[in-house]
Structures are given as structure tokens and as C-alpha cells.
Image (cartoon, helix red, strand yellow):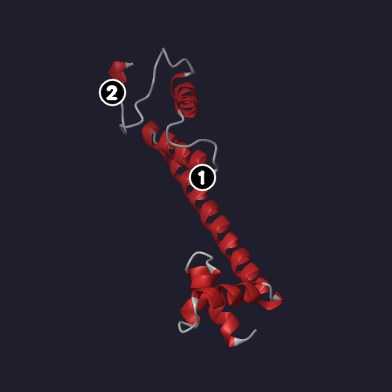
Amino acid sequence: MKNIEERFVAEYIKNGHNGTKAYLAIRPNVSPESAAVSAHRLLQKTSVINALQDVTDKSTEEAIASKQYLINEADEIGKEARGEKVYGTALKAVEVKAKLNRVYEDGDDVGRQNFINFFNYVKYGTPDPEDKIIDITSESEDEDER
């Protein structure tokens, strides 16, 4: 791959995939119209397409590895918290895992309540939210309040 192609790919990725801006960054003396034409021409070249695909593949692999690491960490924190009966932290770990796995997002009250019900079942033996609901904002509960 030629030097200009390498520089173009780097600028193209850096600026969020704008070919005209990428070309202007490496050749600032050309007109925007010429830059657009030249960027389009470069984006048709096999070497540039392959270089962009390599960067995309590597970024995807890194993102998947980072996500999996976070999921594993949340799992470990959750196991440890459940073992120590720190249910607020355990629930938060499950919530983080659910968000990372796109099971639900903030504002999804149904999904959140399902997690609370699950932990009520684990802690109290009942999933009934009317019976007992753990407070996910606190780390411990007063056993007398049950």
C-alpha cells in the first residue's frame, strides 16, 4: 500500500469515516470538490478497502474481548456478593451483565423488576414483589425489617 493510501486510511478512521476530510487532511491544498473525487477513488481501491476491513476486524475483536472481560468481572463480583449475602451488589452485577448483553437498558422497569424478583426468590424463597423487595441501593438490610 502506498504512503498516501496509508495516511488516507488513518485520517479516514480518525475523523469518523469522512473521505473528503481525510483527503483534505493529507492534501490540504486541494479544493473540497477535488478531495471528494480523490477520496472516492481511494475508497474504491482494493488495498484501501482491505486496510479498512483489517482495522474494522481488529476493532471488533477488541470490543468483543473487552465486553467479555467486563461480563466475566461482573459475574465474579456477583458470585462473591451473593456468597457474602450482599444482595444489592449482587443484583447490580446481574444488571450490569444484562446491559452488556443488551437484555435491557436503563428505564426498562419490567426487566429491572424481573431481576429484583429473581433475587427475592434467591434470598427469601419467593419471587412475589408484593411480599419482599430488596433495596438495590443499599448494601445490607436489617433482618428485623423482614
Q: Nearer the viewer, mark 1 or mark 2?
A: 1
Q: Is residue 63 left or right of residue 129?
A: right
Q: Which mark is residue 57?
A: none
Seen from this angle, which residue lies furthest top?
130
Q: Quadrant of residue 138?
A: top left
Q: Residue at x 53, y 71 (%)?
A: 20
Q: How many marks?
A: 2
Estimate the spatial distance between the alpha carbons at disc 1 and disc 2, rounded to whole Å.
Answer: 31 Å
SS at circle 1: helix
At label 1, counting other C-alpha atoms closer than 10 Å, the crowd grade (few under 14, some 14-19, many 20 or more) is some
Compared to residue 89, the image places residue 31 above or below, namely below
Compared to residue 145, the image places residue 137 above or below, namely below
Q: Name the one closer to the observer, 125 or 138.
A: 138
Point out the image quarter for the N terminus: bottom right
SS at circle 2: loop
At label 2, counting other C-alpha atoms closer than 10 Å, the crowd grade (few under 14, some 14-19, many 20 or more) is few
Point out the image quarter for the C terminus: top left
Please tell me which of labels 1 and 2 falls first in the chain.
1
Compared to residue 13, the image places residue 146 above or below, namely above
Q: Is residue 30 left or right of residue 39?
A: left
Q: Residue at x 37, y 24 (%)?
A: 134
Q: x and y percent of residue 38 in the render? A: 60, 77
Q: x and y percent of residue 74 in the render? A: 47, 45
Which kind of residue does numbered mark 1 sit on?
A: Leu
Which kind of residue does numbered mark 2 sit on?
A: Asp
Identify residue for label 2. Answer: 142
Identify residue for label 1. Answer: 100
Q: Name the one closer to the observer, 5 or 78.
A: 5
Q: x and y percent of residue 43 in the render? A: 64, 72
